[in-house]
Image: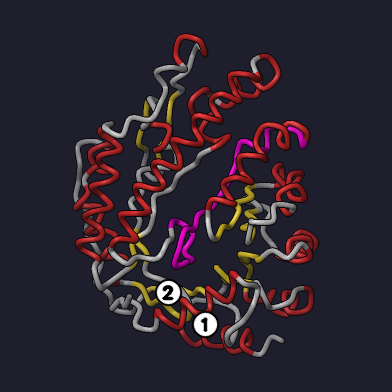
Amino acid sequence: MSFSFKPDYDRVLQRFEAFWQRQIVDRPPVSIALPKPGAPSFQPRSYPSLREKWLDIDGRIDEMEAGMQATDYLADALPIAWPNLGPEILSACCGCGYEFGKTTAWSHPAIQDWERDFPKARLDMDHPLFQTLMEFTRRLLARGKGRYIVGLTDLHPGGDHVAALRGGQQLAMDLIEQPQWVRRALDRGEGEYYAVYGALYQMLRAQGMPATSWTPIVHEGTFYIPSNDFSCMVSQKMFNDFFLPGIRRECAFYERSIYHLDGPGALRHLDALLEIEELDAVQWVCGAGNEGYHKWVKVYQRIQGAGKGIQLMCDISELDMVFETLRPEGVWFSSISGIRDRETAQYAIKRIEHWK
């Protein structure tokens, strides 16, 4: 594939494929995106409601394209458009109520009583939101052909999906009081997730797209970002018993995967996750107020010591510390703060090129 918004895509793909192997072509991947000087401003449409804004597919694509046209994709940054309908869209298509906010969407539980509601809280591929998701993807593919990459939507299966179906606090109680229902929901939800992933993935691959999503990395095969944000609410024992087996199967399902480890409360599960042989890399998100590479050096070293890749977010002032504490193989600089112009970007790239 070639993309006019990223003429050197082939070279970028080589770097990312090397990253997956914990190897290097010429340097680790570095994603730097900057506003393009002199780009025209975009005037969004006005809508009677937030729901209408979210579901105006053509208007959403107009805004995405304007944003990409106003962006300089430097080094290994990629022009990716994905059909965002909020992080719990899978659960919405399984019967949850769904509300759209300014920047995200959220669901309302579909299961108030397990015995009564569980049979109904299942995937409906005829659901209007699922049909919107498929049409959103189709239109992105048609409009972006030869220009930019189209990715998969944000899907949260496993524990996060069951937490949406039931409500997080209630699910925490269910793990103790009604574990058999939790296991049934996880088992059914796993198959439903693979059906949704497969439908979207096949549509994208049929048009020659690499696999990608809200995390801007690509692979020429199955790829996704396993996660379980609910895990911060459970002990290591419960996580390993209820959720880890499904995450392990999910990693085995893909050719490439990055686990989204979200927040200090989830760190207790890191060692168990690192034991998953099929998991390729970890995206550690420290949370607002916890920023600073120096605070998490030992976490990154644990990840690298287990033979996994690292999606790294740091400040340009921290590059020396990164070079001193990690090996370059298997590191992807997905975000470097403190870069505001091309000159500074080139300076950072040159420094990373000399990291041995």
Q: Name the residue under label 2.
A: 34
Q: Where is residue 227 in the image (x, y as percent from the top left)?
A: 58, 46
User: Which quarter of the image is occupied by the N terminus?
Assistant: bottom left
Is residue 191 positioned above or below 310 on the image?
Answer: above
Q: What residue type is labelled 1?
A: Ala
Mark 2 element type: strand
Residue 151 image position (x, y, % from top left): 37, 58
> Which residue is painted at 31% across and 69% down in the image?
148
Frontmost residue, 3 versus 286: 3
The type of residue carrying mark 2 is Leu
Q: Are marks 2 and 1 in contact (CB under 8 Å)?
A: yes
In magenta, the rendered stretch is: 213-236
Of 321 and 48, which appears nearest the observer? 321
The residue lying toward the viewer, choosing from 105 and 261, is: 261
- Would residue 343 be seen by someone viewing this image from the given angle? yes
How does the figure colour the protein chain or chains?
secondary structure
Q: In which quarter of the image is residue 313?
A: bottom right
Pointer 1 local density, CA inside 10 Å: few below 14, some 14–19, many at least 20: many
The secondary structure type at the circle numbered 1 is helix
Residue that carries the numbered disc 1 in the rendered image: 345
Q: Identify the residue shown where x is 62% and y is 76%.
A: 316
The disc at residue 324 is none
Q: Is residue 222 magenta?
A: yes
The C terminus appears in which quarter of the rendering? bottom right
| Predominant secondary structure, magenta span | loop
Above or below for 206 versus 352: above
Name the residue at 38% across, 77% down: 72
The image position of residue 74, as x and y in percent, is: 44, 80
